[in-house]
Image (cartoon, rainbow, N blue to C red):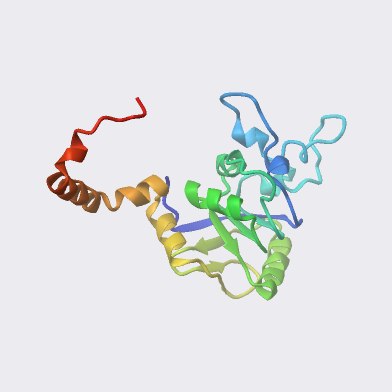
Amino acid sequence: MQPFTTLSGIAVPLLQDDINTDQITPINRNMNPDWAALLFVHARKLPDGEDDPDFALNKPQFCQPGILVTGRNFGCGSSREGAVWAMLATGIRCIVARSFADIYRENCLQNGLLPVELKPADADAFETRVLAADGAAPFTVDLQTQRISGPGGPDLTFDMPAADRMRLLEGLDDIGLTLKHAPEIAAWEKRVAGEQPWLQTASDSRR
């Protein structure tokens, strides 16, 4: 997993509440899907199949996004991890929302995408600044200092649990977190092998 330290990028406003995972990436049976093409694929299109020029990610100034700015309960619905992969495939490595669905937030942490929740007053101010910038200048998200800087106002701070912050800074998924304790695991296995040697030769009843 790619570590997250700082990100400078264009912030795209998609200021809606309750955006679900099926809206983010509809079900796709392709074994090797184009995740970038799937991101908001239905919302991007008009009924005649043409691109909707009013959809944020179709606008020229947002063609290379780095940050998605959105509303409450983002990522609700299913546990579809592809709804995070599609963000990363498009270049979005940070989502600033008023709140996240729990499973979606966890999927973000597992894949190196930073989920930022702002306090209501800060969210109001940040959304106003993002709309005013309209893709003309980047914002910077710094996980080490837990600050967002950019055009139109002072730096904003955000909270992040220490364990979540550590795993993103170090680029660790659940397996990586476990491997941080590899010496302790090896020492435990060695001790148990000496204290309970009969366990080492026991047959596996599942076979």
Q: Residue at x 60, y 30 (%)?
A: 34
Residue 121 image position (x, y, % from top left): 69, 75
Find the residue positioned furthest to the right.
47
Give the residue drawn at x 77%, y 37%.
Answer: 42
Q: Please state which of residues 171 and 128 is positioned toward the viewer in this rendering.
A: 171
Instruction: State the image quarter where residue 153 is shown.
Output: bottom right
Residue 168: image quadrant is: bottom left
Q: Nearer the viewer, residue 103 or 70?
A: 103
Q: Residue at x 42, y 45 (%)?
A: 1
Q: Is residue 47 left or right of residue 93?
A: right
- 106 vs 184, left or right, is right
Name the spot of residue 160 as percent of width and height, x first. 51, 66
72 with respect to 91 (left or right): right
- Which is nearer the eye, 111 or 123? 111
What residue do we see at 54% from left, 48% from top?
Answer: 107
Residue 128, horizontal then vertical, whole percent? 73, 67
Say how many tags the image has.
Answer: 0
